[in-house]
Image (cartoon, rainbow, N blue to C red):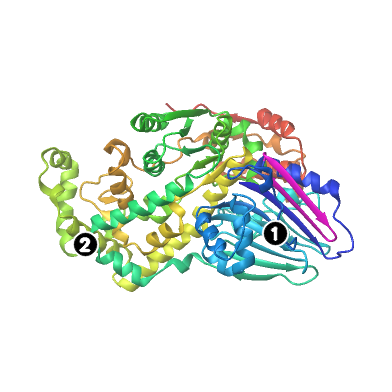
């Protein structure tokens, strides 16, 4: 939604430099292209750049002050239930000056307190609340870390910002060598705590940070991912009939989609062609017709444009696609790294995401619904499923089915069963659920308590790392074009539901599922059942596919790119030793070294992107894709 920055000087006798505050605002402009607000006073400076989605009137401009002039808020995010919060505050006598959620959040923090307010918020947010009387700051970030918030505690001042590069006018940005070393060893990059920049931290999701000039920081947590575990809810869902559980998922997702369609500006849907984004579009189409489906068409044999276009035709919605070519993975690398903030080898699809965000913005759309969160909550990754007879160790009834299923697979039996509607296709739903639970428990271990703990651990791990990297990708690439990403699968109620859902509703034993990645198991079972209600089978049952390009696997990098480079200085390697490193390592590490060098040039040395791009063009070669 916006970009935020603040400085709280330990010496409150001077006012932060106005020129540097304006330069800082420039660094945040793409996150908030619709408006700018700056406040400075003795010891404090606040900056806000606005992407106006709710109440675009100037009265909602930030930094936003309460009526008394004591409290001020700089805020990035959306509160989807703010109308309910607004009515509660009205009963306390609050009279409104705007129709935006910024004012509602500020008044709630004042009237109800920080932690009580945060515990009940439905939405995504990163904000700083400034108390002018006490000269204190309170920073907070949403429970999943959808919105970014970085900070630096220095000798002279405390800084916070939506992105580390907004701090570069106030401190010298240097590499965090621990993060760099971890990255070169194969780690995707930090998502919480230390960042890629030395002495700049990322506030933990669900955390609160209290700051007073010259004092130690005070950290607390208002929620953790693990807090959604609820034994009573888990038992209730386990006792329900499968159809009723699917009804519940339908109800919760529909409510989430409807709430996130709200804005005083156009909202669209990003669609890859997969089941998650297609389902969101189909639900949204039941409630409004004035939106567009946007798609990144990555050229090559794995392009999913046809599926996304078929969805738009099925729903009778506008469809726009942007072509993503092999050359874009070189040409747009400097742009992506500038906004991503560190090398993006963990998510090469960031290139496509940036081009897609630019398409969305060109269509004058400011916010988009995204399908992230479904794979993590409902086990949509192929590696989460049993993949061999030895790993599965299925006892009892399922063991008797397996030889027949294997033989049937070889002879095309399931296709015949599907045609005449007999045999395994008639397995009772409750029996299939029981079989799925037994198989899943057998896969993870015979002890049910240990299995439940492992499942919770798997979900927590997916939400705490894999999902955070995706949220960072969508936020940074969207905000690079002034487009807000919204995530209906990640509402509070849906997270609670997913955490406590029996595992067989996620990864289910399914006799007719013969996907090569995980035969006999259907991933995201409940999502696919729900999609059947809204979409034709060819769209609702499409398997998860990898990102449809191998461009970086076909990239050749000359050692000459690294001559007199940031990387040579960082690793303290002369020409000969650097050439030996580049020529003697595998392709994956070479890509990491390449992106690390580009990051250093763009984000630390502030080398013009055109110069970096020219070096890429001169010293890299992309082989043609196999057809």
Q: Nearer the viewer, residue 272 or 363?
A: 363
Above-or-below relation of 429 to 485: below
Q: Residue at x 34, y 54 (%)?
A: 249
Residue 34 placement, left or right of 362? right
To which residue does mark 1 refer?
66
Residue 530 placement, left or right of 571? left
Mark 1 or mark 2: name the one nearer the start of the chain: 1
Q: Residue at x 52, y 49 (%)?
A: 470
Estimate how packed mark 2 is, as few (under 14), some (14 to 19) or many (20 or more) residues with alpha carbons within 10 Å.
some
Q: How many marks?
A: 2
For the residues marked 1 and 2, what is the alpha-carbon distance in whole angstroms? 56 Å
Q: Is residue 381 visible?
A: no
Where's residue 112, x and y in %?
Answer: 59, 68
Where's residue 546, x and y in %?
Answer: 43, 41
Q: Secondary structure at mark 2?
A: helix
Q: Nearer the viewer, residue 578 or 70?
A: 70
> Which quarter shows the C terminus?
top left
Q: Which residues are magenta?
A: 33-49
Where's residue 39, x and y in %?
Answer: 78, 52
Where's residue 408, x and y in %?
Answer: 16, 45
To which residue does mark 2 refer?
434
């Amino acid at each position: 939604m916006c970009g935020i920055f603040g400085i709280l000087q330990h010496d409150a006798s001077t006012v932060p430099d106005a020129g540097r505050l304006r330069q800082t605002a420039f660094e945040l402009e793409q996150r908030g292209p619709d408006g700018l607000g700056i406040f400075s006073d003795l010891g404090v400076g606040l900056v806000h750049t606005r992407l106006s989605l709710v109440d675009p009137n100037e009265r909602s401009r930030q930094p936003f002050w309460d009526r008394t002039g004591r409290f001020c808020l700089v805020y990035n995010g959306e509160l989807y239930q703010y109308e309910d919060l607004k009515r509660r505050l009205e009963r306390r006598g609050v009279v409104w000056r705007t129709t935006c959620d910024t004012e509602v959040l500020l008044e709630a923090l004042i009237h109800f307190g920080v932690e009580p307010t945060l515990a009940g918020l439905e939405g995504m947010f990163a904000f700083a609340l400034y108390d002018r009387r006490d000269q204190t700051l309170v920073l907070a970030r949403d429970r999943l870390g959808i919105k970014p918030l970085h900070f630096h505690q220095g000798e002279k001042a405390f800084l916070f910002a939506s992105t580390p590069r907004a701090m570069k006018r106030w401190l010298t940005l240097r590499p965090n060598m621990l993060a760099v070393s971890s990255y070169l060893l194969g780690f995707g990059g930090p998502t919480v705590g230390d960042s890629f920049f030395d002495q700049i931290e990322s506030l933990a999701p669900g955390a609160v940070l209290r700051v007073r000039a010259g004092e130690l920081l005070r950290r607390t947590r208002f929620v953790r991912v693990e807090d959604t575990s609820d034994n009573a809810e888990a038992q209730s869902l386990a006792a329900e009939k499968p159809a009723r559980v699917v009804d519940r998922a339908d109800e919760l997702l529909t409510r989430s989609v409807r709430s996130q369609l709200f804005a005083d500006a156009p909202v669209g849907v990003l669609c890859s062609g997969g089941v998650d984004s297609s389902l969101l579009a189909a639900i949204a189409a039941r409630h409004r017709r004035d939106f567009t489906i946007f798609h990144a068409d990555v050229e090559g044999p794995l392009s999913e444009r046809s599926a996304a276009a078929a969805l738009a035709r099925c729903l009778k919605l506008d469809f726009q696609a942007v072509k993503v070519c092999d050359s874009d993975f070189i040409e747009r690398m400097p742009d992506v790294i500038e906004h991503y903030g560190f090398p993006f080898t963990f998510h090469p699809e960031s290139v496509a995401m940036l081009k897609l965000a630019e398409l969305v913005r060109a269509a004058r759309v400011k916010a988009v619904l995204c399908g992230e969160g479904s794979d993590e909550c409902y086990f949509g990754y192929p590696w989460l499923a049993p993949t061999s007879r030895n790993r599965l160790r299925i006892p009892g009834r399922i063991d008797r089915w397996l030889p027949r299923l294997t033989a049937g697979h070889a002879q095309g039996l399931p296709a015949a069963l599907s045609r005449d509607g007999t045999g395994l296709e008639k397995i009772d739903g409750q029996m299939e659920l029981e079989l799925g639970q037994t198989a899943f428990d057998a896969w993870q271990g015979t002890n049910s308590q240990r299995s439940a703990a492992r499942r919770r651990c798997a979900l927590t791990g997916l939400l705490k790392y894999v999902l955070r990297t995706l949220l960072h990708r969508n936020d940074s690439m969207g905000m690079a074009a002034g487009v807000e990403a919204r995530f209906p699968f990640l509402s509070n109620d849906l997270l609670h539901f997913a955490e406590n859902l029996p595992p067989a509703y996620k990864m289910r034993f399914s006799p007719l599922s013969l996907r090569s990645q995980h035969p006999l198991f259907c991933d995201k079972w409940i999502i696919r059942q729900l999609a059947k209600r809204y979409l034709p089978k060819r769209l609702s049952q499409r398997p998860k596919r990898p990102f449809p390009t191998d461009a970086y696997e076909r990239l050749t990098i000359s050692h000459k790119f690294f001559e007199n480079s940031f990387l040579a200085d960082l690793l303290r390697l002369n020409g000969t030793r650097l050439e030996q490193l580049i020529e003697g390592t595998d392709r994956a590490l070479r890509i990491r070294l390449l992106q690390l060098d580009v990051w250093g040039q763009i984000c630390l040395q502030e080398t013009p992107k055109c110069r970096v791009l020219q070096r890429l063009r001169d010293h890299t070669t992309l082989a043609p894709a196999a057809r």
